[in-house]
Image (cartoon, coloured by chain):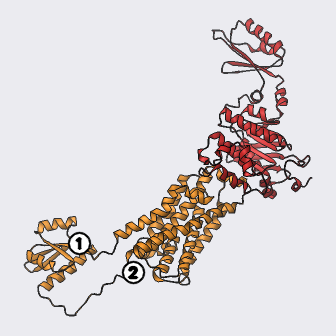
Amino acid sequence: MTDSRNVKTLTLDPGGNTPSLLLRGLRKAFGDVVAVDGLDMEVKRGECFGLLGPNGAGKTTTIEICEGLTEVDAGSVELLGLDWRTGAEELRQRIGVQLQETQFPDKLTVEETLRLFRSFYRKGISVDESIQRAQLEEKRGARVGLLSGGQKQRLAMACALVGDPELLFLDEPTTGLDPQARRHLWDLVDQLKQSGRTIILTTHYMEEAERLCDRVAIMDHGRVIAQGTTQQLIASLGAEHVVEFAVAERESSEVNVAPLLAIPGVQSHRVDAGLHQLSVGELHTAVPSIFAALDGQGLELSEFRTHSATLEDVFVSLTGRTLRDE
Amino acid sequence: MRFRLFLREPEAVFWTFIFPILLAVGLGIAFRNRPADVLQVGATTAQLTQALAGDKGLTAATMDEAAGTRALATGNILLLAIQKPEGVEYKFDDTNPDARTARLLANRAIQTAAGRQEVVSADDLLVHEKGARYIDFVVPGLLGMNLMGSAMWGLVFPLVEARQKKLLKRMVASPMPRWQYLASFLLSRLLLLVIEVAVFLGFAVLAFGVPFRGPLWELALLCVLTSVAFSALGLLVSSRAKTMEAASGLLNLVMLPMWILSGIFFSASRFPAAIQPLVRALPLTAANDALRGNMLQGMSLGQLAAPVAILLAWAAAAFAVSLRIFRWR
């Protein structure tokens, strides 16, 4: 076991093979509600790991347990080889945290806020540098209360980074932001990934998980229901494409699903509010057969489209619900 | 940083500095040492009226009994002297201290006019000494009230707001030691205290000539102790409150009894003996007693040991409990 005190900044050897984060059998309930139910998770050093799931899946509770903010009812939490009960001070110096909805004191300026947070850490980057990285130069002297949503999130991220952490937690970093602000933040995270930090983020946007994360754990109802790289997860569907269609309304417009499923390459069928979804292996062989099958039933298509399978489709196939349902 | 935050909160500045000054001014004006009130009385005959006019403390008017009774009922006059065959009858409300005074003055005037001689020669020596006026009594009480208000509001609102906005949670996730966060509030409070007290007392001295009989450094110490005790109490109040509304309610619950019972505007010993132990144990009562003792009577800290001990006890107990139950999330 490497001495964790030798791990200084990210430029050095990141402690060998010890995982950044190790969760075993985590359980946490708030009164009657079980937020986390037997969770196992492992995050390697230097990877960008995502927790994907709908609202209420237990992502925030899990991440707050990791950040040392919530105590577990059962299970073990190990960060950078340390334990929250014994190594709390050390850990807080080495991690960076961005909470969901933090609001900083409105009347302080951006610079003052960063300076305040910087003062907590023994080592870190300078306030000037963190302002630059977050691209908040023009807003340096502005009061926090006057910033836009995107700017506030960048400030929150800057505060998380100002201590030059090895391990960074981002809880729903782009929720509530417009697409441009979101892209801005993604660029920031890209830069961070290059510097070798371990990043753990939670999100309910599958594009975000796909775009940013090396590996993803899909959560639902307090459990991890799938884990792996994006490609692995999509491959687990058995089909990389999804065909969606709707039939025109007529008296006998019941779609007989059996022949569709019989087509080679068609993995599964699902219908949601009149829109049929088939997960399909190879489009060029399956699609003509689908057309033929529907035609054979005397049905007329009103809509037809295809897309490559996404993590959302993985979620749907595992749970029968979409990420956006809650 | 905390100091800067405070200054940018204009409402806080108003309540801490301006309000107590306004209050002191208002009260000072209301209770200023005017020459003793001239009391209104009525009489049923001109002869009586003339006799009454002989006393400088009375203003008399002639009226018939019916008008006089109406005037009594509306408070226009305090006493009606009715001429009767067998002598004079005084009609007045004996639960009203001014009316009782009027009765005495009126009787003396009428008797003297009728030829009564004073048996013992008596003379008046008026006392307008500083330190015995109402404003002198009130100023230390206002100081105590001000110290309580600024310590409690100044601590509770920012803390609960920070908790509500999840800022507390964010702070706790960082390496900042928790006690430092709380200590920063106390420190900024003490800094502001210096300014606050100086402004208020400076005004009191300049405008009303309120005396400072006790050593000034001891007065300063008492102010600090009071502020610390109420800061601790503020910490306790803010330990669990999740919203500003809850905090407001709690604050009022705690401060209201003290506003009434602790002897700010009138002596706490006016309350019945049964609740005196409760009254004396309240931190604001102790603070007011100590402040008054120092300013008006020049008592030393040793003589003020009892109220000082009460304040210390409150400070220690409130700190201890709040550190255990303070909710950071």
Q: Position of residue B214 (x, y in %)?
A: 50, 82
Query: In percent of the image, x 60 and y 62: which residue is there?
Result: B235
A216 relative to B69 in the view: left or right: right
Mark 2 or mark 1, whichever is nearer to me:
2
Spatial separation of the CA atoms under disc 2 and disc 1:
33 Å
Please say whether residue B87 is visible from this viewpoint.
yes
From the viewer's perspective, is residue B24 above or below residue B296? above
Q: Position of residue A27 (x, y in %)?
A: 76, 46
Residue at label 2? B130
Furthest-bottom residue in this view: B120
**Secondary structure beneath disc 2?**
loop
- The chain assigned the colour red in the figure is A
Residue at label 1? B93
Residue kind at label 2, given as amino acid type:
Lys
Furthest-front residue in this view: A138
* Quadrant of res B171: bottom right
Query: In percent of the image, x 65 and y 56: which residue is there?
Result: B327
Nearer the observer, A288 or B94: A288
**Secondary structure beneath disc 1?**
loop
